[in-house]
Image (cartoon, coloured by chain):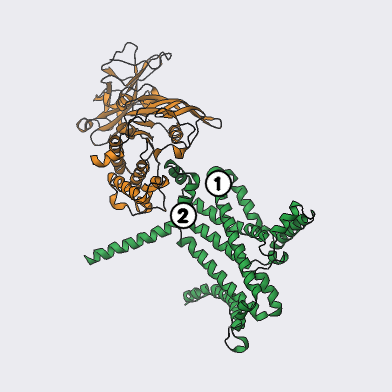
Chain colours: A green, B orange
């Protein structure tokens, strides 16, 4: 009897967490699609009615895409270079990449604002002022790309670093170069395919950050989706909740995909599934005989 | 077989020269002026204890390390500053160097893919090599689905696929068990001779080094102690280190006037020349008044290794005897050891001339 109770109590925290997470979401969904107690998708008409949403969505996706490209294109070579040629610098890189975790986003935002203001104060037509203008352009605020890359560093660094530790990197690179390949050819043909899981994780993680970040975008007054939601919630609360639900669900799906991909899309995982399929085929063959 | 191998065979003329190669890591000197000439089509094994610099020498030839001074020449051309990926040198590593994300076939094709050989030619060549290495049925498998021996065969096929002028093997068999090791060793030798490919084989295993090589270079502390045919290395070692490191020896004292032939074993004391005698050149004669006592027998199949000691002066004698003789030499038997024939090496008591050889 006691053991049965113990088994149920195992599930208790999970159920509690599940309730804690799902109840607000379920309430939001109910509020968004059951206005006045009857099912209606009328709140979503804002998607077509309000042009500023489409603009904010496009901007956010563009920022996300640029963030991902910048993050992967700089972090993967950097971590790789440290592993291959400067293992002593690895702790330095690790600390640098972990720093954003201990700096509150609002402090980061304040710093960025101060920097941009300093640029603007250098006088009309000066280079600093031009650069400052350019990177905070309302249509495509590149400053957000840079800031989001920094925000993503702690987790993506850890993921890629761990990925590179589990593969025999030196043997791969030397084997590949003895066969005539350049270092970057090796990275493309051998190293990246073997850390596909961690790289995909970084991609999805960065997407989730870009879709959800509010503090910095709001401080800089650049209209990304979260900022749009906040603005619209003043005039059309139901619409803001409706879109928030949509955003929330898509972020969750992305994170789910990210978690699964870490295992599923790794090269070894792929090979193992192939092997399982092969074994199954041979067993079936044997049974047929 | 002949038809397929002619397509792979190298044209002659890929000799390798290490010309005064030295290498230091920080303040440690790993190689001290290595001069070595490997003729075209020759297989030279580099043998030595761990830390002797043998792998460093190989990595300098591969292009993974830069020598501190000296030159490396292949086919008469100085390649010292050519990067590894443009040397066209095939290499087989100790273990686990196959690309885990690629199938066996793709691994073998890799070097050709880098060279932009078209798909059809690539596949044909990979098939040919996999057949040569007895791996045809594994083409679509992945490295982790193969045994260690199979993986090393794939690594060999992969290295040979680019038709390298020179093949380097860095302890390729040390992670394998004994039976597979000797099988693959023979296969490597067969392929190497068929293709006539200049080969440098690094190992710490003396049996491996002797059995596969045209010549053996014995390395100690970054210096080549001796470079000779396997038979000479074993029968006529030129230094004490080589005598002790390759095969086993008993150190026997002899007076200056000893000129070969039978000799009762005595302890190598000051003032006496030291003879380094191979186990097969020593007999143990059972003798109730003998000075030594048999302490152990190690059965190795064809021969039995018998050890005897003289507790009075710590003399230790190793003899290799037939199974019949061994039955009279159970542990505890008192024996008189005797040198039967010419010792492998004689070191004069007068240390000014340490490598004076007995030439009988």
Q: Is residue A56 above or below residue B349?
A: below
Query: What chain does badge 1 belong to?
Result: A
Give how far across and how far down residue A48 sits, in percent: 61, 78
Q: Residue at x 47, y 76 (%)?
A: A4
Judging from the image, mark 2 belongs to the subunit labelled A
Query: Residue B92: x percent and y percent?
Result: 38, 41
Q: Quadrant of residue A274?
A: bottom left
Tag 1, which secondary structure?
A: helix
**Residue A193: which numbered mark, if any?**
2
Reading the image, the residue beneath label 1 is A81
Q: Residue furthest top?
A: B257
* Residue B58: image location, x then y, percent: 43, 34
Residue B304 visible in the snapshot: yes
Q: Position of residue A176 (x, y in %)?
A: 44, 45
Q: Secondary structure at mark 2?
A: helix
Number of other residues with Cα within 10 Å of mark 2, as a class: few under 14, some 14 to 19, many 20 or more: some
Residue B298, picture quadrant:
top left
Judge by depth and name the residue closer to the eye, B241 or A250.
A250
Measured Cα–Cα span from mark 2 to mark 1: 17 Å
């Amino acid at each position: 009897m006691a053991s049965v109770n113990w088994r149920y109590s195992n599930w208790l925290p999970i159920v509690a967490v599940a309730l804690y997470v799902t109840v607000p979401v379920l309430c939001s969904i109910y509020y968004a699609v059951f206005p006045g107690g009857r099912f209606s998708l009328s709140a979503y008409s804002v998607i077509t009615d309000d042009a500023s949403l489409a603009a904010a969505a496009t901007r956010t996706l563009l920022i996300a895409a640029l963030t991902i490209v910048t993050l992967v294109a700089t972090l993967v070579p950097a971590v790789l270079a440290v592993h291959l040629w400067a293992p002593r610098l690895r702790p330095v890189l690790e600390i640098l990449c972990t720093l954003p975790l201990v700096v509150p986003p609002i402090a980061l935002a304040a710093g960025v604002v101060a920097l941009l203001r300093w640029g603007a104060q250098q006088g009309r037509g000066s280079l600093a002022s031009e650069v400052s203008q350019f990177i905070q352009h309302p249509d495509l605020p590149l400053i957000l790309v840079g800031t989001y890359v920094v925000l993503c560093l702690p987790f993506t660094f850890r993921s890629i670093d761990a990925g590179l530790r589990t593969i025999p990197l030196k043997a791969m690179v030397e084997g590949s170069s003895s066969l005539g390949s350049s270092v970057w050819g090796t990275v493309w043909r051998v190293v990246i395919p073997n850390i596909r899981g961690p790289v995909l994780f970084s991609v999805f993680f960065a997407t989730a950050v870009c879709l959800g970040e509010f503090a910095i975008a709001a401080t800089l007054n650049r209209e990304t989706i979260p900022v749009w939601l906040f603005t619209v919630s003043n005039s059309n609360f139901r619409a803001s909740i409706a879109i928030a639900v949509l955003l929330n669900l898509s972020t969750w799906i992305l994170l789910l995909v990210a978690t699964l991909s870490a295992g599923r899309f790794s090269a070894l995982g792929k090979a193992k599934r192939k092997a399982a399929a092969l074994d199954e085929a041979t067993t079936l063959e044997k049974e047929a005989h | 077989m002949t038809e397929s191998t002619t397509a792979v065979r190298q044209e002659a003329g890929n000799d390798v020269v290490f010309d005064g190669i030295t290498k230091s890591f920080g303040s440690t000197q790993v190689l001290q002026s290595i001069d070595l000439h490997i003729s075209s089509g020759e297989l030279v094994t580099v043998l030595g204890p761990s830390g002797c610099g043998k792998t460093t020498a190989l990595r300098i030839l591969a292009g993974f390390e830069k020598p501190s001074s000296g030159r490396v020449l292949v086919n008469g051309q100085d390649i010292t500053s050519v990067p590894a990926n443009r040397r066209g040198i095939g290499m087989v590593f100790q273990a686990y160097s196959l690309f885990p994300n690629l199938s066996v076939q793709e691994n073998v094709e890799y070097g050709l893919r880098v060279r932009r050989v078209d798909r059809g030619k690539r596949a044909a060549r990979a098939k040919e090599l996999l057949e040569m290495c007895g791996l045809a049925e594994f083409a679509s498998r992945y490295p982790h689905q193969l045994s260690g021996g199979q993986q090393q065969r794939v690594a060999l096929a992969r290295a040979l696929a680019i038709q390298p002028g020179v093949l380097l093997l860095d302890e390729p068999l040390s992670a394998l068990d004994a039976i597979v090791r000797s099988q693959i060793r023979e296969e490597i030798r067969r392929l190497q001779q068929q293709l006539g490919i200049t080969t440098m084989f690094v190992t710490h295993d003396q049996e491996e080094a002797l059995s596969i090589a045209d010549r053996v270079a014995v390395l100690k502390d970054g210096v080549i102690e001796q470079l000779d045919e396997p038979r000479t290395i074993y029968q006529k070692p030129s230094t004490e280190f080589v005598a002790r490191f390759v095969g086993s020896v008993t150190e026997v004292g002899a007076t200056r006037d000893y000129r070969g032939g039978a000799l009762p074993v005595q302890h190598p004391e000051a003032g006496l020349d030291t003879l380094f005698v191979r186990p097969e050149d020593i007999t143990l004669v059972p003798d109730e008044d003998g000075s030594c006592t048999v302490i152990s027998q190690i059965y190795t199949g064809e021969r039995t290794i018998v050890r005897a000691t003289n507790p009075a002066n710590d003399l230790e004698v190793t003899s290799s005897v037939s199974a019949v003789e061994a039955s009279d030499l159970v542990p505890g038997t008192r024996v008189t050891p005797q040198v039967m024939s010419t010792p492998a090496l004689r070191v004069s008591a007068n240390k000014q001339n340490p490598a004076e050889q007995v030439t009988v």
